[in-house]
Image (cartoon, helix red, strand yellow):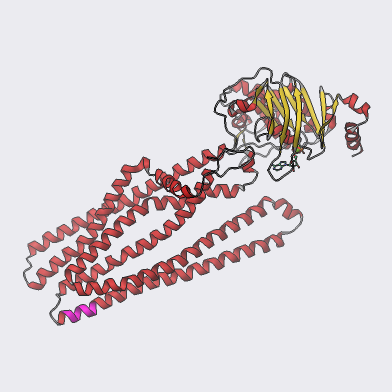
């Protein structure tokens, strides 16, 4: 086991044991459904056995007919038996079709649930490098191919084995020479079948990848549709799409060609064998070496004999798809979450929430330069500190280190003297409120979004938080007040309104520590004033770290820090810093010019 390195995504474990571990993992999903699987397999056995019993009954009837010993009573009895067999087979088939699929679907569901839980444990560093579309595909599409494999796999193997062995046994029992001749032509058929099936699958997989390309293309165009239209570049986008669309068509053409050859070939082979059996059987009957009854049974059994080949070919496809899907799925699961609770981490409630950075260094990746280097800063409990500096100086990065969204490389961050690594993540994050420039609101009502801060908040608390955040008035003016749907299917809120909802959410949570990262930068002056008032109220009595783009908004901060290339280059109150005529004064002058 390798240790999870801070900031790195570890893909641990040596390759040799990887395969066994994955196979074990693959099989582990069967565990809760062992009994259902057993029933499914028993039913599969019955399906195969009844299929074989039918030609035997046919043989018995026709034999009696041919020998003139048939009595209507015996025929009626055999007919009854056959009807019973058909009924049993129908029941079993229905059971396998329904229950088998359900078990497969449940196992699929288990896999999805596991991956979803895993996704939530992965850190910002992971999500920095992933595309949401890909992550969704791992969760939705990949398990889909496995659900089929999980139940069809065992079923098909059982059915194919019994049918093949049974049909062969019947054929040999009836006429060993003819049976041997049929057996001899099966390998080339199997080779043909697997060959074209593989080509078909390759093309199918190609087509699926092309669908992925189309999706990515469409996602890109639609996400940027405002830019597309602003630049009047619709023709350009249409051209890009047409190219992806054409490649998709090409890959499907290959698939259909192979598919046509596969199915035509399989049908032709089956028919040729039947023709051969009829011709040679007829000759044998002429020579009194075979009875008409046996010939009929032979013809029936040939079809049963070919079926396992089709099944195994089908299974090979499921297996290939499933194996690819499973390794992609497992790869995701094997990514160890890099930010975890330390074994000794404890639940924690802070005092005032004093924050100390002690010689902290951090870089996003091992191959990029440090964003934060030997950084030290102490913020007293209840103090408001403003952080300013050029864009890219590392202000957001510093903020992200406090709730451990990223792990510091060297040095330590402490809250009220406790190193944050010794605190349970959930407990740490519960005590830190963050308001950023882009606010994310979930699909749902306003009330639901506010309660994201504290699910058990009462209606009164909800309204109080909204009032504190200067949001109550605009909420009550909406058509359904607090029950107004927002997001994709609901009303569209302005940037300032969304921001005030985000602030109300933090009010409800009531954390001792507050991080405001350019919370008002995207707002126009009017909404900024309202949000600013809300933020000031929110900051009262909390340890607050404000990052502000517009320096006018932090004039009143108790302490202003100017972050430069080498860490903090200046520190003081607004007026003092202006008088000093340093970096802050230059930043301020630059903004007044603009
Ligand atoms: P600020 O908030 O002061 O504008 P940031 O903290 O956002 O600056 O960024 C500091 C530096 O870190 C920049 O050079 C930026 O490119 C880099 N950076 C920010 N976020 C990431 C990330 N998720 N992955 C890699 N590099 C990043
Ligand atoms: Mg920033």
Q: Residue 331 location in percent, x, y?
A: 52, 47
Q: Residue 170 location in percent, x, y?
A: 20, 66
Please say if 68 is above or below 484: below
Q: Which residues are magenta?
A: 278-284
Quadrant where ligand 1 appears: top right
Q: Which quarter of the picture shows residue 184?
A: bottom left
Q: Quadrant of the C terminus?
A: top right
Q: Is residue 281 magenta?
A: yes
- The residue nearer to you, when weighing 61 against 474, is 61
Residue 226 seen by the camera: yes
Q: Which quarter of the picture shows residue 61?
A: bottom left
- The residue nearer to you, when weighing 411 against 545, is 411
Name the side, left or right, on which 372 lies relative to 142. Answer: right
- The residue nearer to you, when weighing 321 against 95, is 321
Q: Is residue 87 magenta?
A: no
Identify the residue at horizontal 65%, vertical 34% (top origin).
Answer: 407
Q: Residue 148 location in percent, x, y?
A: 41, 52
- The residue nearer to you, when weighing 454 against 512, is 512
Residue 497 seen by the camera: no
Q: Residue 282 location in percent, x, y?
A: 19, 80
Instruction: State whether the magenta stretch is mostly helix, strand or loop.
Output: helix
Please say if 303 is above or below 222: below
Please say if 58 is above or below 86: below
């Amino acid at each position: 086991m390798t240790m999870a390195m801070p900031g790195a995504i570890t893909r641990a474990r040596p390759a040799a044991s990887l395969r066994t571990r994955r196979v074990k993992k693959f099989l582990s999903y069967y565990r809760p459904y062992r009994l259902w699987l057993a029933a499914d397999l028993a039913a599969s056995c019955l399906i195969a056995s009844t299929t074989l019993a039918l030609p035997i009954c046919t043989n018995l009837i026709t034999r009696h007919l041919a020998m003139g010993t048939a009595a209507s009573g015996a025929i009626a009895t055999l007919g009854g038996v056959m009807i019973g067999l058909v009924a049993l087979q129908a029941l079993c088939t229905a059971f396998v079709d329904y229950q088998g699929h359900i078990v497969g679907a449940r196992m699929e569901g288990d896999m999805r649930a596991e991956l979803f839980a895993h996704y939530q444990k992965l850190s910002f560093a992971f999500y920095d490098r992933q595309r949401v579309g890909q992550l969704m595909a791992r969760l939705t599409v990949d398990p889909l191919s496995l659900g089929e494999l999980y139940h069809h796999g065992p079923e098909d193997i059982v059915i194919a084995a019994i049918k093949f062995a049974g049909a062969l046994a019947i054929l040999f029992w009836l006429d060993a020479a003819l049976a041997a001749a049929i057996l001899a032509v099966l390998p080339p058929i199997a080779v043909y079948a697997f060959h074209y099936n593989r080509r078909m699958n390759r093309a199918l997989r190609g087509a699926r990848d092309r669908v992925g390309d189309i999706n990515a293309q469409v996602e890109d165009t639609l996400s940027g549709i405002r830019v597309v239209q602003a630049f009047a570049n619709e023709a350009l986008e249409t051209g890009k799409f047409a190219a992806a669309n054409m490649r998709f068509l090409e890959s499907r053409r290959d698939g259909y060609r192979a598919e046509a050859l596969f199915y035509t070939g399989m049908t032709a082979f089956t028919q040729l064998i039947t023709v051969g059996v009829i011709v040679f059987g007829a000759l044998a009957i002429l020579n009194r070496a075979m009875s008409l009854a046996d010939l009929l049974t032979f013809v029936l059994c040939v079809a049963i004999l070919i079926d396992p080949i089709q099944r195994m070919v089908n299974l090979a496809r499921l297996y290939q798809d499933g194996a690819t899907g499973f390794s992609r799925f497992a790869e995701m699961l094997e990514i160890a979450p890099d930010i975890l609770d330390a074994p000794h981490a404890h639940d924690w409630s802070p005092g005032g929430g004093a924050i100390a950075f002690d010689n902290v260094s951090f870089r996003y990746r091992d191959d990029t330069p440090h964003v934060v280097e030997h950084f030290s800063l102490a913020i007293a409990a209840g103090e408001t500190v403003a952080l300013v500096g050029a864009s890219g100086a590392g202000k957001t990065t510093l903020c992200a280190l406090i709730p451990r969204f990223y792990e510091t490389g060297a040095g330590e961050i402490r809250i009220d003297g406790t190193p944050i690594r010794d605190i349970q993540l959930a407990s740490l994050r519960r005590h830190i409120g963050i308001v950023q420039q882009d606010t994310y609101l979930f699909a749902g009502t306003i009330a639901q979004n506010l309660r994201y801060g504290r699910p058990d908040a009462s209606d009164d608390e909800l309204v109080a938080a909204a009032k504190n955040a200067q949001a109550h008035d605009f909420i009550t003016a909406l058509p359904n007040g607090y029950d107004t749907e927002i997001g994709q299917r609901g009303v569209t809120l302005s940037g300032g309104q969304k921001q005030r909802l985000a602030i109300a959410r933090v009010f409800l949570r009531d954390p001792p520590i507050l991080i405001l990262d350019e919370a008002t930068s995207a707002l126009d002056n009017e909404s900024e004033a309202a949000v600013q008032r809300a933020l000031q109220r929110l900051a009262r009595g909390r340890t607050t770290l404000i990052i502000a783009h517009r320096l006018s908004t932090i004039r009143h901060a108790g302490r202003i820090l100017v972050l430069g290339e080498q860490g903090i280059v200046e520190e003081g109150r607004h007026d003092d810093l202006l008088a000093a005529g340093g970096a802050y004064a230059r930043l301020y002058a630059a903004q007044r010019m603009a």
